[in-house]
Image (cartoon, rainbow, N blue to C red):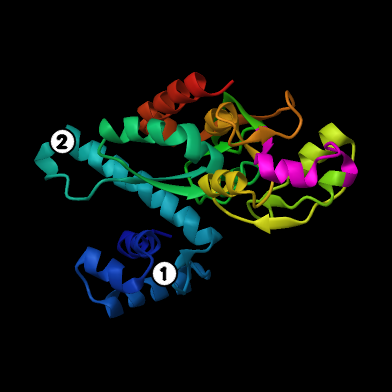
Amino acid sequence: MMLDYGAAAAVAMIVRTGSFEKAAKALHVTPSAISQRVKLLEERLGAVLIERGTPCRATEKGAWLCRHMVLVEQLENNLLEQLPELGEVSKGPVTIDVAVNADSLGTWFLPAATAFAERSNVLLNIAVDDQDHTADWLKKGRVLAAVTSMSEPVAGCDVTALGKLRYVATASPKFFSRYFSDGVTAATVGNAPALTFNQKDTMQQDWIATHLSSACAPPTHWLPSTQGFIEACMLGMGWCLNPISLVQPHIQAGRLVELIPGTVADIPLYWQISRWAERQFPDLKHHVLDIARASLL
């Protein structure tokens, strides 16, 4: 069965823009034409490709189709660059989907992404998830590359060790005096409000298990922001683990204190990228490795 590339391009544009209307505008057709193309392709494949909503998202099979279209676009652009007689490169820049954990995005990854973007006409679509879950985005075909804690390569991908991101558990001096005047123990930490990024974040409990030999779950505030963690910590909202590179100046200035001085949590990180994407965009890996190895342990 031959793939209807016009319909596949419509699916990819809907996922990229988030709506049928925006995709129609980008492709210079009517929304009804876009809708008809997607409907016919879904019927032909016997699978739903788009989760209708605000925004529209790809299903797992739709994500694989979108990934294929990225490859097709890049191959077409490469061909037209080598054979200009066929016509001009008419498509816009290729967009690469990448999954990154929030703390890498908040510390070292953006300089790497910027260095790549400055020297390329490729765009990046950066998704954020916990480092223990970004590999799932690769497995489902939703991204071409990821920063992950998974050392085993996902099928079709190469994996490279980046280094370790070091964390320390911190609190404001006022918070520390209020909750830990008798020391940081399983009993006192069990009553001290923590900060938790989201339901996937187990770092605070892992730190308690490692350094206090306890399985207690402290009360927690939910705060999905790397910078918000630091600000809330300094304001005395709760205690939490933060990348040491972000909080070291605050520790030195006395705005934060370590719960147990000298205790750290080192999270190993890896770069996983599809072999096709690595061949097509070798500079992306080079910039990621250069910045990571200068920034991580």
**What's the distance in space between the residues labelled 1 and 2, CA to CA?**
31 Å
Q: Which mark is residue 83?
A: 2
Does 4 sit above or below residue 170? below
For label 2, the SS is: loop
Q: Is residue 223 magenta?
A: no
Q: Residue at x 80, y 41 (%)?
A: 180
Determine whether, in the image, residue 65 is placed left or right of residue 23. right
Q: Amino acid at mark 1?
A: Leu
Determine whether, in the image, residue 115 is placed left or right of residue 225. left
Q: Residue at x 40, y 26 (%)?
A: 287
- Asked whether 98 or 240 is in front, the reply is 240
Q: Which residues are magenta?
A: 168-187
* Quadrant, the C terminus: top right
- Asked whether 75 or 29 is in front, the reply is 29
Q: Could you say where residue 119 lies in the image, as x and y percent from the top left?
A: 26, 30
Q: Residue at x 39, y 71 (%)?
A: 38
Does 243 sit above or below residue 74? above
Q: Which mark is residue 172?
A: none
Q: Residues within 10 Å of mark 2 (few under 14, many from 20)?
A: few
Q: Could you say where residue 273 lies in the image, as x and y percent from the top left?
A: 50, 35
For label 1, the SS is: helix
- Asked whether 60 or 19 is in front, the reply is 19
Q: Could you say where residue 72 lies in the image, as x and y percent from the top left?
A: 34, 47
* Residue 259 picture quarter: top right
Q: Upstream in the sequence, badge 1 or badge 2? A: 1
Seen as rendered, the residue at the extreme bottom is 32
* Residue 169 picture quarter: top right
Q: Is residue 170 magenta?
A: yes
The residue that mark 1 highlights is 41
- Asked whether 88 or 19 is in front, the reply is 19
